Amino acid sequence: MADHIASAHDSGRAATWSDIAVLARRNAHIRPLYAELLARGVPVEIVGLDGLLAVPEVADVVAVLRVLGDATANPDLVRILTGPRWNIGPTDLAILGRRARELAGGGALEDELSPREEIARIIDTTQAAQSPSLAEALIDPGEGPYTDAGRARLGQCARELTALRGHVGAPVTDLVRRIITTIGLEVELALRGPQGTRQLDAFVAQVAGYADIDGDGSLPGLLAWLAAEEDHGVGLEQAVPTASDSVKLLTIHRAKGLEWEVVYLPALADKVFPSDRVQGNWLTRSDVLPADLRGDADNVPQLAEMSDAASKAYAAALKDEARRADDRLAYVAVTRARQHLVATTHAWSDLLRPRAHSPYLTVLEGHADGVTHAAVSPENPLLTGSGGVAWPRPFDEAQAALRRDAADLVQQARAGRNDHPETLLLDEAAVVASWDAAADRLLAEARLRRGGADAVAPPYWSATSLIALQADADAFRADLLRPMPAAPRRSALIGEQFHAWLERRAREEPALLEEPALARPDPRLQRLIDAFETGRYADLRPTATEVAFSLFLGGQVVRGRIDAVFATDDGFQVVDWKTGRAQDPDPLQLALYRLAWSELSGAPLERVDAVFYDVLGRAVIRPGSLPGRPELERLVGTLGAPR
């Protein structure tokens, strides 16, 4: 597939790398393809945190975070110790494991286990609560028969982690940057070239986004957030690919609302896509909320009664629901391609029997311009050999050369000289980048004033900005170039408070302050609440509230947030609350929200209704016919086009 992607670009089928995307059902399929594309020199970007966590350099940073936050994170410490930086061998690692058991009172150094058995015991995650702490043994390794090099490296690693523990109370973004600098990733990745730090930069941006949501955040909170992404992997909000010219790798969940000229769908194999996993059965999983307690209880299968027959019927209903969800996801996947769709399958993975083709692939074969069949090996080629790993690892000359280059740069800096003056230091590069950005803004303003043809556009559009651009394009573009602070409006604050109240109401959450003396609402807010409580939506339970979305329309990214969605007999109704003057609201906003919900939910567009609701007037405002995707593509493309 990596060769095919490179060929698609070189042959002109995709004019730019960013015209190509690979959409995977599971994150496990992203990492190997990322490595293959990188090896071929193809610029590539993993979109979304869940996929980034599988990238080696990101996994190294996360391993350090876990060791700092959890003294029993033995598998993560083993990753650090056996990695290329410390290169601790199995014998030294086994001795450290025995020392950890000794400190925990569970054995002595004389207990004889083979290195394989000792390491297997120390990284056994099923007994994490009772496991001895490898981190404690690293601080106090004892007098065991370590090799001289191993003892020295263990001591260096312990000092490094101890120094980092002194910063666990810092803002998490600062902590992550300190880890990257301390373990030397920044320099090593920079030697790969301009693309070297792309994925690590994306991870830092994700952590910064988490910190923006949760204040400065905390290390336990960040680790819980990362664990949730690993377990569930669909993200709380859609990720938006950057504008960089690179192949985009992402899960199908994250591709909703986006399009590319050429789209690849790997792993269309039976029990992969559609999946054979049913993860929502609370009868068999302690980490799943009972279905009748969920906020969307009316829209998910329910257990009829506590009996064996009812349990089997409930499991069957969940399986059917999971298949329908995969069907909707398959529709999303195949409709992301503007021109070319390439679907692939595989027979072998880590199984003893080959997989059958996915029924989705069978359907696509019936409509494909061409089908290529490859011979299937009678034996699994992935299971050849014993599964052992050579130690020491085979010498990697390319990696060693990179590290020698990095060491040379360090020595030059220590000596106060720079043999490569054309190479900027990171701080210098940041200053130059700020100069470039300022120059671009000034040149864009000059072109605008001369009536030039270059577009002036933000990195993404909101529904509000598109409406403003449609109303007065010149004023909007001038404001982009020279943004002026706007005076805070009391009505906007009241609107935000009303939306927050509605969200709490929908979730049946109490207000933070219940005492009337402490929580005196603004009279205007109280009028909105009273009006809503006597309006038509007061007794209706929303299917979703405050739904963030991203759409790719006319070559532009459009982002927004839907106020509320209600289930109807015919499908869904999208509602936008109007808390101020509601005369003649722009239907473009509703059209975007309607399309977004259709693509997020998989519901046909004709089954999605959209209205404004004047809260104070208790009136539904229903525009005439709303445009669909083709009309919005043309409209947004025209609005965002150069003038």
Image: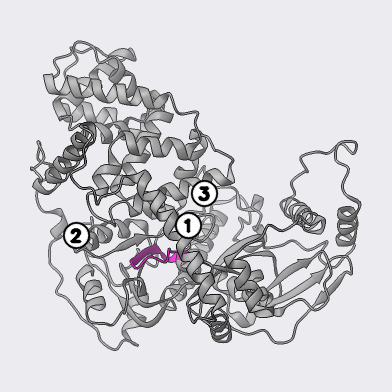
In this rendering, does residue 564 appear at all? yes
Q: Secondary structure at mark 3?
A: helix
Q: How many marks?
A: 3
Does the residue at mark 2 contact the one at mark 1 (Cβ under 8 Å)? no
Earlier in the chain: of badge 2 and badge 3, it is 2
- Residue occupying image coordinates x 13% and y 23%: 149
Q: Nearer the viewer, residue 457 or 517?
A: 457
Q: Residue 361: percent from the left, percent from the top? A: 33, 77
Picture layout, residue 429 above or below residue 82: below
Rendered image: mark on residue 39: 2
How many residues crowd mark 3 within 10 Å: few (<14), some (14–19), many (20+)?
some
For residue 274, what is the image quadrant? bottom left
Q: Which residues are magenta?
A: 241-254
Q: Which residue is mark 3?
A: 209
Locate residue 174 relative to residue 429 in the image: left or right. Answer: right
How many residues crowd mark 2 within 10 Å: few (<14), some (14–19), many (20+)?
few
Q: Nearer the viewer, residue 466 or 476?
A: 476
Mark 3–mark 1 distance (CA, rounded to whole Å): 16 Å
Picture layout, residue 331 above or below residue 183: below
Three-letter amino acid code at the position of disc 2: Ala
Rendered image: mark on residue 234: 1
Earlier in the chain: of badge 3 and badge 1, it is 3
Mark 2–mark 1 distance (CA, rounded to whole Å): 27 Å
Mark 2–mark 3 distance (CA, rounded to whole Å): 30 Å
Q: Secondary structure at mark 2?
A: helix
Locate residue 7 relative to residue 198 in the image: left or right. Answer: left
Locate residue 2 relative to residue 551 in the image: left or right. Answer: left
Three-letter amino acid code at the position of disc 3: Gly
- Foreground disc of the pair 2, 1: 2
